[in-house]
Image: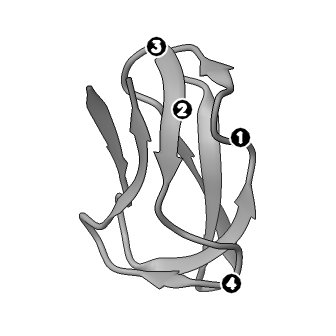
Amino acid sequence: MSEVKASMAGNVWKINVQVGDEVSAGEDVVILESMKMEIPIAAEASGTVKEIKVNEGDFVNEGDVIAVIE
């Protein structure tokens, strides 16, 4: 099981996957918006999205778990 974590604090601008989707390592899972910049957050491992822990518009801090990949 792998967790996708926020690399910096920001707002969840867009969620690119849904529960049950297959993702590859390096694939963008979420895009954060911080200081008017879009920051893609990629999966570190391939697998199936088991859980998405945020909603679009939510604020996340650095290190917060965004999604779980199994």
- SS category of the residue bearing label 2: strand
- Mark 2 residue type: Val
At horizontal 24% and vertical 64% (from top left) the residue drawn is 63
Disc 4 marks a residue whose amino acid type is Gly
Q: Are marks 4 and 1 in contact (CB under 8 Å)?
A: no
Identify the image quadrant of residue 12. bottom right
The answer to whether the residue labelled 1 contacts the one labelled 2, judged by CB atoms less than 8 Å apart, is yes
**Residue 11 placement: quadrant:** bottom right
Task: Check disc 1 and report the residue beneath it.
Answer: 17
Across and down, in percent, residue 50 comes to 48, 36
Relative to the observer, which residue lies in front, 20 or 39? 20
Mark 2 crowd level (few <14, some 14–19, many ≥20, 10 Å Cα):
many
Q: Mark 4 points at which residue?
A: 57
Q: Nearer the viewer, mark 4 or mark 2?
A: 2
Give the CA distance from mark 1 to mark 2: 8 Å
Work out whether mark 4 precedes mark 2 in sequence or the reverse, and give the earlier one.
2
Residue wearing tag 2: 49
Residue positioned 38% across, 23% down in the render: 70
With 66 as the anchor, is 7 left or right in this view?
A: left
What residue is drawn where x is 39% and y is 78%? Answer: 9
| Left or right of residue 40, residue 60 in this image | left
Give the amino acid at mark 1: Val
- Label 3 neighbour load within 10 Å: few <14, some 14-19, many 20+: some
Of pointers 4 and 1, the one earlier in the residue sequence: 1
